[in-house]
Image (spheres, coloured by chain):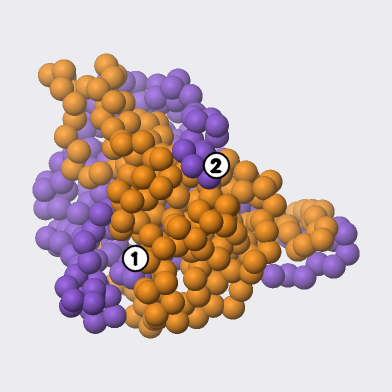
Chain colours: A purple, B orange
Amino acid sequence: MLGLSSPATLRVEILDSQNETWFKLEFEKVALKRRMVRNFQPKLVPKEKVSRILSLALHAPSAGFSQGWAFVVVQDANLRKQIGDLQGEADFYAGKRFHKFVSEAPVLIVACASEKMYHDRYREPDKLKDDGTEIDWPTPYWHFDIGCACMLIFLAAVDEGLASAFTGVFRVQEMKKLLSIPDHFHPVGVISIGYGAKDIKSPSLKRGRRTIEQVVHYERW
Amino acid sequence: MLGLSSPATLRVEILDSQNETWFKLEFEKVALKRRMVRNFQPKLVPKEKVSRILSLALHAPSAGFSQGWAFVVVQDANLRKQIGDLQGEADFYAGKRFHKFVSEAPVLIVACASEKMYHDRYREPDKLKDDGTEIDWPTPYWHFDIGCACMLIFLAAVDEGLASAFTGVFRVQEMKKLLSIPDHFHPVGVISIGYGAKDIKSPSLKRGRRTIEQVVHYERW
């Protein structure tokens, strides 16, 4: 906590602006600015930005600090094209008048989760039940945790002046083969990252955002 | 990384600090400051803070904009005690020398995910496969998405000068009954929120954070 005693305090911050507009954004602005952007400029993303985004992702929480996640970063154009094909962008996204925002994004991050690493962790002595057996898993927390880590990636991209989009992996075995992903890791999705371009909004948005009254209940449902 | 080469711009920001320390934090600071805090001061949390945290959570992404999430906010002391009991804090957390950070947190948010809302969404015409059937789900994206929404809650709490902790729900049916959670919603976890107090660090942290070299692979694994 920074103890600011007087009623209002001035904070002076130096903002960097070189060729592009880039500066540190407040958390709330980042959270509100973030959306899935489904079109990218061909402009390359500096590798420092990619590194910073990934470094922050490692700060996601995880059950038992299992950290059962991994990320494959793909920038090679040929490999991006193959991933775009696996994600079905030619017939699916382009058919719905989206851009080819998988292969055309300069950076792809394939997010993977390992259920095995959670079982391994929860078979360690400090996590066993009193009877010496592993806990039951009512929820696959490896998917919850990789969601947390990906959320940090989405937000960190905005903070870096970039945009991102997420596509779920449906051709799981082919993706694993293409990227040599080990057996116990499951590719959950492909995060496209780059400088955003004007995109066609997802028709899903017409559904509207559920209101706080619909989503939040007080004391009991 | 503020690369402070010219041209640099000065931004002057007025920080609010009334009775308590509160100001807008930069995204990166929020992300790095966030950790599970397992002890809380009894001090009440202003309801505006709770509202802002929940409002931001609604900005999480979701497959097909399904938004299959709900949050039950519990502040009643008796109900918090019952939730603490269900979460096993008396014999589990206290036994390991944690504080009773479920019942003692002034605000609990029980995060719920509905698989049904995703199936409903993906049975709408624009989401059906060419053969008219629902897609297969290689990943339970409802758990990924609730992870995204909870990550926003964890971060927004820090932004509000608060701390949070997460406990998974293992007594699912009892929790549903206690809070009148509808059948198709699954309580994933309880988020404790309040003003943080000195806590005992989780022994899991001794495992150490996996390094970027361990977690990130370039081009192929």
Q: Position of residue B215 (x, y in %)?
A: 31, 67
Residue B155 visible in image: no
Give the residue type that dot 1 points to.
Ala
Residue B200, can we see it?
yes
On the rendered structure, is A141 left or right of B109?
left
Q: Residue at x 45, y 58 (%)?
A: B82
SS for callout 2: strand
Q: What's the mark number on residue A218?
A: 2
At horizontal 50% and vertical 80% (from top left) the residue drawn is: B200
Residue A52: where, in percent of width, then height?
47, 62
The structure residue drawn at horizontal position 77% and vertical position 70%, both measured from the top left corner, is A3
The 10 Å Cα crowd at callout 2, few under 14, some 14 to 19, many 20 or more, is some
Q: CA distance from mark 2 to mark 1?
A: 27 Å
Query: Element under label 1?
Result: helix
Q: Is residue A113 left or right of residue A32?
A: left
Of tags 2 and 1, the one toward the viewer is 2
In which quarter of the view is residue A185 placed? bottom left
Percent position (x, y) of residue A46?
46, 56
Instruction: Give the quarter of the image for residue A51.
Output: bottom left
- Is A121 displayed left or right of A62 in the figure? left
Spot occupied by residue B128 in the image (x, y as percentages of width and height): 22, 22
| Location of residue B142 (image quadrant) | top left
Q: Which of A121/B188 is in front?
A: B188
Residue on which disc 1 sits: A63
